[in-house]
Image: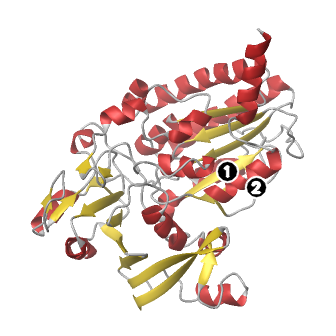
């Protein structure tokens, strides 16, 4: 692989007068981009920032948080609707984009038919997306748009299906795409590029979650009607799963059934206002409360130290990042635990189970490296090289970078959104819609 775009200059600061391209990728790990940046690629950008995604590490909750348009109806297009007491369908809502509120802020999203076959032909689909998105960007800029938002989904297909060296080869083509666009615009364009979540790099085997629950005497059903009933949505092939239960006693049986599985690295459950969690290292609980215009979060070990925070919390209190009761804001947890096995797990677990989606499962699991769960039908068609969804660092750690300035690092997706809005004067959709209205009125 040859050298990248190291010799092209970057702009010195964001400007609301120059057009802004927000380039959204799917499923690209910080490790991949940092490696390429060190090799001389993507040097039209400042150094990539380490971004900690939301939990679960899925596209819709992540980009809904970034665009501030959540909560999502479900974690995925197929989910358990508690109000209707039923598992929803998945494929039809997916084809309608019913779970993708954030997409209304974009100028391009691949067609859903190609989306469905992307994992069979990831490189072909990626190159096709580069060609089409270039036409969309050129068209928007030619019409005087000051804001263009492009979402490239096929990078997720690359991450699921290709090895790291082959992913790097494809991302080098994206570097050339960016360089060509900037060269043609003569520097009169700013770009922010980011991704929604990371992705693991270990070939995966299927964990048959429903079978495990049935062997524990639980009934996997579409509607919850009696004790022992559980509903398990399965759509994507993920290293994360969630379970909805009839009652608290059933929830406790699910936790017990999954706690000693070698395929499971963390189990969490909702218990009133608390989130409990369990790993091989012990048990703890998380609480949250409102503090002015923000939420603050507290971690309390019950047994052992499952998140490895024994030394972190006293240091946060000593530095003034945590109050006397042990509560701290999300940004402080990100800053202090971004490189832990479960980065920023305290706010991300609570938010993921209680705030970011209308689907609020009773139990969630983050699977160990090398395992996935999900649709049995899809698993017959693909052999994955990696996946995402879980709380672990493998899927949680993604990136962002700007041609205008170096972004703060580490940072969460919601904090990243605030920085881009402040530095670029970005109001998603507003500048583009205003330009389109002006063009329409002049016709």
Q: Which structural element holds mark 1? A: strand
Element under disc 2: loop
- State the mark number for residue 357: none
Quadrant hosting residue 231: bottom left
* Rendered position, 315 above or below 115: below
Mark drawn on residue 400: 1
Q: Position of residue 403 (x, y in %)?
A: 79, 43
Classify residue 292 as left or right of residue 225: right
Q: Is residue 190 above or below residue 32?
A: above
Tell me, yes or no, if residue 367 can be seen here: no
Task: Determine the CA span between mark 2 and mark 1.
Answer: 7 Å
Q: Quadrant of the C terminus?
A: top right
Identify the residue at image location x=30%, y=55%.
82
Foreground residue, 94 or 385?
94
Q: Do residues under tags 2 and 1 come within 8 Å of each other at their CB atoms? A: yes
Q: Where's the N terminus, which quadrant?
A: top right
Mark number, residue 407: 2
Label 2 CA crowd tier, 10 Å (few <14, some 14–19, many 20+): many
- Left/right of residue 199 with respect to residue 65 in the rendered view: left
Q: Nearer the viewer, residue 49 or 349?
A: 349
Residue 376 visible here: yes
Q: At x 47% / y 55%, what residue is drawn? A: 57
């Amino acid at each position: 692989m040859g050298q990248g775009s190291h010799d092209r200059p970057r702009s010195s600061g964001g400007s609301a007068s120059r057009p802004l391209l927000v380039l959204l990728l799917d499923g690209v790990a910080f490790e991949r981009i940092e490696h390429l940046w060190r090799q001389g690629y993507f040097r039209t950008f400042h150094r990539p920032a380490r971004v900690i995604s939301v939990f679960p590490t899925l596209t819709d909750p992540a980009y809904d948080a970034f665009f501030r348009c959540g909560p999502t109806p479900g974690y995925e297009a197929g989910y358990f609707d508690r109000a209707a007491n039923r598992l929803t369908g998945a494929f039809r809502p997916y084809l309608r984009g019913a779970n993708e509120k954030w997409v209304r802020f974009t100028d391009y999203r691949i067609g859903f038919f190609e989306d469905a076959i992307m994992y069979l032909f990831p490189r072909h689909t990626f190159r096709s997306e580069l060609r089409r998105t270039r036409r969309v960007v050129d068209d928007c800029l030619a019409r005087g748009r000051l804001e263009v938002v492009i979402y490239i989904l096929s990078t997720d297909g690359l991450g699921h299906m290709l090895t790291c060296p082959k992913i790097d080869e494809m991302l080098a083509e994206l570097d050339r795409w960016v360089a060509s666009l900037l060269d043609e615009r003569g520097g009169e364009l700013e770009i922010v590029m980011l991704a929604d979540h990371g992705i693991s790099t270990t070939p995966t085997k299927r964990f048959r979650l429903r079978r495990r629950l049935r062997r524990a005497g639980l009934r996997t059903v579409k509607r919850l009607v009696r004790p022992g009933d559980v509903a398990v949505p399965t759509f994507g092939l993920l290293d994360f799963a969630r379970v909805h239960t009839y009652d608290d006693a059933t929830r406790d049986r699910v936790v017990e059934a999954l706690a000693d599985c070698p395929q499971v690295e963390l189990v969490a459950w909702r218990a009133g206002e608390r989130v409990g969690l369990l790993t091989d290292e012990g048990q703890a609980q998380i609480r949250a409360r409102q503090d002015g215009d923000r939420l603050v979060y507290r971690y309390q070990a019950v047994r052992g130290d499952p998140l490895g925070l024994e030394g972190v919390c006293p240091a946060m209190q000593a530095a003034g990042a945590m109050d006397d009761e042990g509560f701290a804001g999300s940004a402080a947890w990100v800053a202090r635990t971004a490189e832990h096995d479960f980065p920023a797990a305290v706010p991300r677990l609570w938010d993921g189970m209680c705030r970011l989606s209308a689907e609020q499962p009773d139990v969630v699991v983050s699977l160990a490296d090398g395992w996935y769960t999900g649709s049995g039908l899809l698993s017959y068609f693909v052999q994955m090289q990696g996946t995402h969804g879980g709380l672990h660092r493998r899927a949680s750690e993604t990136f962002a970078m700007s041609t205008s300035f170096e972004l703060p690092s580490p940072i969460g997706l919601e904090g990243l959104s605030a920085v881009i809005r402040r530095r670029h004067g970005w109001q998603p959709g507003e500048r583009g819609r205003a330009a389109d209205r002006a063009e329409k009125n002049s016709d």
